[in-house]
Image: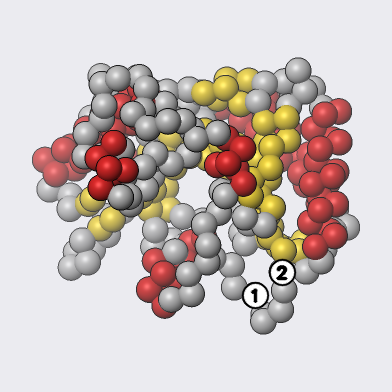
Amino acid sequence: MNLFQNNYSSSSEDNSDDDKLPVVPHSILDKYHIGPSINTADYNKDNSTMSVKFPAKSFWNTFIYLEWRPTTRDRQQLFKLVTHYTEVFKRNGIPIKIKPLYWSDLGSPRPLHVSITSNISFNNVNNRDKLLERLQIEIQKSNIKPFEMTFNRKPKFMRSCSNPKVCFLVLDIETEIKKKYMIQLHRIIEKCKKELNSKTLFNLDILQSHMSIAQVHFKHDTKSPDIDTLNQVIEDEPADNVEIPSFEVNAVKFDKNRQSLSIRLPK
């Protein structure tokens, strides 16, 4: 474990482009995409934003999104961004801690994602599988080719849609990408969901599409600053020395059980 942490230390960013450990194949990463359930009070409390509470019966869930696995160079830029705003808020007397989401608690790289839906729940496993089948057909029939996901230069703070007590530092997707790709993907999913008796955790505003890169923690003994106040600080003190990464989108991800399935975009 110490070797693993040393090779993937989150305290500083490696200057090389290659991670020190061998690359794990995507097929393995996708197969074990969701970790095992831990039924403890503390775990459920800390991860309440990802849990869905339903009556005591079986439900089959999925989550549809775009995934990005940042390279070492990408993480260096994100690290510079987080470091910049950590220092900015400290200098402005705002007591917050910005914890990167692209590192796990063990110090290993984690993928980031852009949500196209919230968690979708079915009381019938066949309906969940029908959604996957429909999506595979409709996406292949669409004119959505692989595209470059790009973001606005300035990040912003947003409250969690499922838990307003939780706040994230996010990269806002450029408006042109939202209009050309995100809205179309969202419409395809909504069309495929029809008559499948599904339930969503919350209604997602696709025009607010973004990528969360860090979670913000406020000191327990202080009042949480207003989001508008935090975003005004970002507006006033931009991170001009940071190159905001972009990445190619060539597949839509669909969680099934504990694995992540890829629905390839047509070429």
* Observer able to see residue 99: no
- Sequence-first tag of 2 and 1: 1
* Observer able to see residue 174: yes
Identify the residue shown where x is 17% and y is 49%.
94
Residue 42 in the image, given as x and y percentages of width and height: 38, 73
Q: Is residue 212 left or right of residue 61?
A: left
Identify the residue shown where x is 55% and y is 54%.
34
Q: Which residue is label 2 attached to? A: 59
Q: CA distance from mark 2 to mark 1?
A: 8 Å
Amino acid found under the numbered disc labelled 1:
Phe
Amino acid found under the numbered disc labelled 2:
Phe
Q: Would you say the residues marked 2 and 1 are in contact, meaning their CB atoms lie under 8 Å apart?
A: yes
Taking 85 as reference, is 241 above or below it?
above
Residue 185 in the image, given as x and y percentages of width and height: 72, 35
Taking 114 as reference, is 76 above or below it?
above
Closer to the camera, 34 or 119? 34
